[in-house]
Image: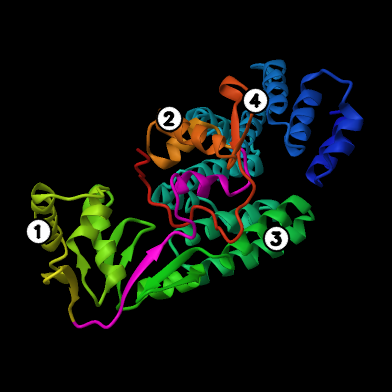
């Protein structure tokens, strides 16, 4: 490896892509193409970066498997950064095995972290934890230690364990400073801000108050009866009743919880659950059926009693009923929550994370774009969507795994 390639590699490791490009921008050999690709990725030019990295992989060919594998890992990192989550996980796994076989343990570990970060992004927390458990953080470089702790924190945040998340982020901050890479500092700072940002809203007895993630953790650990509009469940004292696949029942449960300890009229319940302004005997009969279903579902935790005007929630042995709501509630709020991380997303990636069809996501994006809430650039498979961060809106910490946007 010549001196220019060595110098460009050191510049990239220090987070100086422009310095690296000055050294190799006019060269088209495989090592230079790889370094140019990484530099373009650091500058946010993801499409160009992937083209250069693929050219480098072809240039290395089968005679240099380790160098080719490094290009595959770099391309996977670019895909992850550009929120293209459809890249072949088996190709990354093969590249990781090649790197391990050639003794490049640092890049092999980096490949493993890319796998874990993808699992974390699409909500497969158990898989992410298993993959993370196969790595020994004590043997990692400072940069990889920072990446390790960021993943640990990400899992803790998604599981709403704020103390674990904060401790991991403190370790990540120290490792990032040891590594001396400004981009890592910025990523750690962004993660720390999540813990101090509004994560949800608490609605109880007519009051609507913002909550940070640690407040959410405390609420879920309490004995309160919680109708969780973030994960579409009803929970209390460790008992969780999922209602994500029964939206009418969840809407009725939320309406009764918001009104507690008072009742809700039949007309109001019909309008809210069935989206009808007028009602007749058939609607009232349907309401009785749905209330009966909800009563059976909630039997382990609460009763629903009929009143002269409608229905009321009767919670046993409790004095507190709370609705946990998203920070911003509007149509397609879940899409906005993902875009609020400031990254550019493809519609296919959004579809994968939200667990719904790409056509449904595309329709949501088109409506949001028409309302001026999201922006798009690129064409075809390279088309991406983004939005400026919403004030007081955290990322998708409390989103359920599967969401219905229809």
Q: Is residue 384 magenta?
A: no
Q: Which mark is residue 378?
A: 4
- Residue 392 visible in this rendered orientation of the protein: yes
Q: Which mark is residue 292?
A: 1
Q: Position of residue 340 (x, y in %)?
A: 58, 49
> Of tags 4 and 1, which is closer to the observer?
1
Work out whether mark 2 precedes mark 3 in sequence or the reverse, and give the earlier one. Answer: 3
Q: Is residue 321 above or below residue 68?
A: below
SS label for mark 2:
helix
Q: What is the spatial separation of the Cα atoms under label 4 and label 3, in whole angstroms?
A: 36 Å
Numbered disc total: 4
SS label for mark 1:
helix
The quarter of the rendered structure image containing the C terminus is top left
Q: Which mark is residue 175?
A: 3
- Residue 238 visible in this rendered orientation of the protein: no
What are the residue bounds of the magenta stretch? Answer: 317-344
Occupied quadrant, residue 2: top right
Q: Are marks 1 and 2 in contact (CB under 8 Å)?
A: no
Q: What is the spatial separation of the Cα atoms under label 2 and label 3, in whole angstroms?
A: 39 Å
Question: Which one is in front, 388 or 161?
Answer: 388
Q: Are marks 2 and 4 in contact (CB under 8 Å)?
A: no
> Could you classify mark 1 by the number of other residues whose Cα lies within 10 Å: few (under 14), some (14-19), or many (20 or more)?
few
Q: What is the spatial separation of the Cα atoms under label 2 and label 4, in whole angstroms?
A: 17 Å
The residue under label 2 is 358
What residue do we see at 56% from left, 58% from top? Answer: 393
């Amino acid at each position: 490896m010549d001196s220019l390639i060595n110098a460009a590699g050191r510049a990239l490791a220090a987070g100086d892509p422009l310095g690296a490009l000055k050294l190799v921008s006019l060269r088209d050999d495989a090592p230079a193409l790889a370094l140019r690709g990484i530099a373009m990725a650091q500058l946010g030019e993801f499409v160009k970066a992937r083209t250069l990295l693929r050219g480098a992989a072809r240039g290395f060919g089968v005679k240099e498997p380790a160098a080719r594998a490094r290009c595959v890992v770099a391309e996977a990192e670019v895909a992850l950064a550009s929120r293209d989550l459809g890249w072949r996980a088996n190709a990354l796994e093969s590249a990781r095995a090649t790197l391990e076989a050639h003794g490049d343990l640092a890049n092999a570990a980096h490949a493993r972290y890319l796998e874990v970060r993808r699992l974390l992004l699409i909500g497969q927390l158990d898989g992410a934890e298993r993959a993370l458990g196969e790595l020994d953080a004590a043997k990692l470089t400072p940069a990889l230690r920072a990446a390790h702790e960021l993943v640990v924190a990400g899992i803790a945040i998604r599981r709403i364990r704020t103390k674990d998340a904060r401790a991991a982020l403190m370790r990540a901050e120290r490792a990032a400073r040891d590594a001396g890479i400004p981009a890592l500092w910025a990523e750690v700072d962004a993660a720390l801000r999540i813990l101090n940002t509004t994560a949800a809203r608490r609605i109880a007895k007519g009051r609507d108050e913002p909550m940070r993630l640690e407040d959410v953790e405390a609420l879920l650990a309490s004995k309160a009866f919680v109708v969780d509009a973030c994960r579409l469940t009803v929970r209390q004292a460790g008992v969780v009743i999922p209602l994500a696949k029964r939206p009418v029942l969840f809407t009725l449960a939320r309406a009764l919880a918001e009104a507690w300890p008072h009742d809700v009229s039949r007309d109001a319940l019909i309008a809210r659950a069935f989206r009808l302004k007028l009602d007749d005997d058939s609607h009232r009969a349907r309401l009785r059926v749905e209330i009966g279903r909800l009563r059976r579902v909630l039997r382990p935790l609460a009763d629903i009693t009929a009143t002269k005007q409608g229905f009321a929630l009767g919670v046993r042995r409790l004095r507190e009923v709370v609705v946990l709501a998203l920070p911003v509630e509007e149509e397609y709020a879940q899409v906005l929550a993902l875009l609020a991380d400031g990254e550019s997303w493809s519609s296919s990636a959004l579809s994968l994370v939200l667990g719904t069809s790409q056509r449904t996501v595309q329709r949501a994006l088109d409506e949001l774009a028409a309302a001026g809430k999201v922006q798009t650039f690129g064409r075809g498979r390279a088309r991406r969507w983004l939005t400026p961060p919403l004030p007081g809106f955290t990322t998708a910490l409390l989103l359920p795994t599967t969401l219905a946007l229809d």
